[in-house]
Every structure is written in C-alpha cells, then in structure tokens.
Image (cartoon, helix red, strand yellow):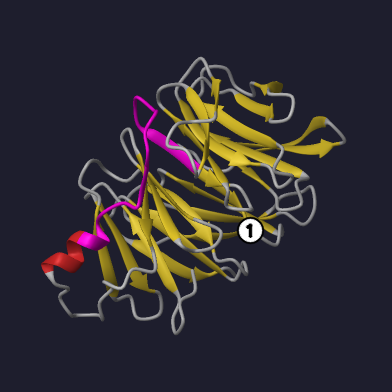
Amino acid sequence: MTAAESVILVTGGYDHTIRFWEALSGACVRTIQHTESQVNKLTISPDKRFVIAAGNPHVRFYDIQTSSSSAPGSQPSANASAASSTPVMSFDGHTGNVTGVQFSSDGRWFATCGEDKTVKLWDLRSPTPTREYEHHAPVTDVQIHPNQAELVTCDQAGTVKVWDLFANTCTHQLLPEEDVAMRSVAISADGATLIAGNNKGNCYIWKWIKSELRPIKQLLAHKKYLLKCIMSPDATKFVTCSADSTVKVWDANDDAFTLTRTLVGHQRWVWDCSFSADSAYLVTASSDHSARLKPRS
C-alpha cells in the first residue's frame, strides 16, 4: 500500500501480531496485537481502509488509517495501542483455521475458505455469511475471478473447483493428482490463465477458452511443497514459493512458462509472496521470521 510519504508493507504471523513497515528503511511503524490466534492470511481492502486478518477461526478487520500509528523508534501510549489493536469489524462463521481471504474489486464483499471444508461469501454490511459452498476436504485457497462472477478454490484432496456465483453451482472440478494436496491457485488479471500448485511442487496451468478450461502445461516448479503461486498484476510473470526456501519467477508471456529467476536468501519455508500494484516489486514471507522486498527483474 502507498501512504502519503512512503511505501508501507503489512505482515502477519504466528506471533499473533500484524506489523506495518516502511519498505525502504525496514522500520516497523505500527504493531497490531491479534491476540486471539495466529494470522494465517492477510489482505488489504481495495480502498486501503482496512487490513483483514484471517485467523482461527475468525476474520478481523483493522483500521489502516488509525491516528495511533507512531514514528519509527517511538512508543505509542497504552490507550493508543489498545485502540489500534481493536478490530472495527468481525466476521465469525468458520469453525477452524481460515486459510484464505480475498476481496471483490468493488470492496463490497469478500470470500474466505477454511479447514472446516467450506468457502464463504460475506457482505460487509452483515456479520454472517451470505453464501456457502462445500468441499469434501479442508480448503486451502480461494481466488475471485477478475469477472467477479466466479470463484476458484482448492483443497487438501487435490481438487480445484470453479464456482459460478450467478448460477450458484460448481461448473468445473479438476483433479490433476489424486490425494496430493493442492495448496494455492492464481488467476491472471485478464482472466485467461489459471494456475494451481500442489504439495509435490507441481504447477498445473489451464487456459480459459470460452467456458472451457483447457490444460496447457505442467511444471515441476519445486522438489518440495509448493506453498503459494501468484500472477503479477500485469500478467507477464507468475511466482512460486516453497518449503525448499526458494522463490521462483516464471515468464507468463507465452505458453512456454520458462523459469527466469530463482530467488534465494530465506533460511526456512517461504509461505507467501505478493506483488506491488505496479508489478515492480515482490515481497516474500518465510518461517525464518523475515519478509523480503525485491525488485521483480
């Protein structure tokens, strides 16, 4: 996210905190205490008003533009710290870890998934889910298609599902490798490409041809668990990160999907990654307790 004078990164972790960082200096400028559980996933609302934390089993919204943010090195008052750590909205309905969360482009609704084998849709005006879809295994990721009319989800049984939100039904069910947990799904910004990655380190790539999902490529991206795959906002690259402690950047400009760069430096599993809005920078997060910011190229 971009603040008035600096670029701010937001991270969450198993230490029950959400931290705001000045990207260029690496200084932590704010800490939110997420006391109820670890933070499994974070996302920021399209209007940059809220940071949303997916925990166990809750989803909590925190105000980004709080007046209690402090300068690097300073200590906020106890009252300010308590206020900044108080969620402004809470959404309860999952019965286990919430493993994925994503906002619609207009910021009016969002989707979550969890280990309770469900996918839920939420309206910001209601504390209860407006819709629910079921898997037969814990759900590991959810993505909203750029057309805002479909969801893509995946689960620990290896299934990838596409849900039509207008017809309120599952239109595609893909099973590239049976009983190999699918960890992550990604959709290109133009809606033409779907990528899914699993526990064997394999990436499966499909193209949307009209209403059909046509398989075009299988990649052995990593030799250990693939934990996250993402597409760059400009749809020219996709990135995978893994339990092998590496991050790999792949060319998505053609159907070859060639490896262009391997990023090393993390000492443990790399659990997550994210692009800046202009696709120029890549952030990676690891269980070595660090987040790293790198230029994409």
Magenta span includes 93:
yes
Q: Nearer the viewer, residue 94 or 125?
A: 125
* Mark 1, secondary structure of its residue: loop
Observer able to see residue 185:
no
Observer able to see residue 137:
yes
Residue indicated by mark 1: 232
Magenta span includes 50:
no
Bounds of the magenta segment: 83-101
Q: Nearer the viewer, residue 87 or 112?
A: 87
Q: Residue furthest front?
A: 125
Residue type, mark 1 in image: Ser
Disc tally is 1
- The residue that appears at 33% across and 33% down in the rendered structure is 57
2 with respect to 277 (left or right): left
- The residue that appears at 46% across and 62% down in the rendered structure is 49
Residue 36 position in % (x across, y down): 22, 41
Residue 132 position in % (x across, y down): 54, 24
Q: Residue furthest bottom?
A: 5
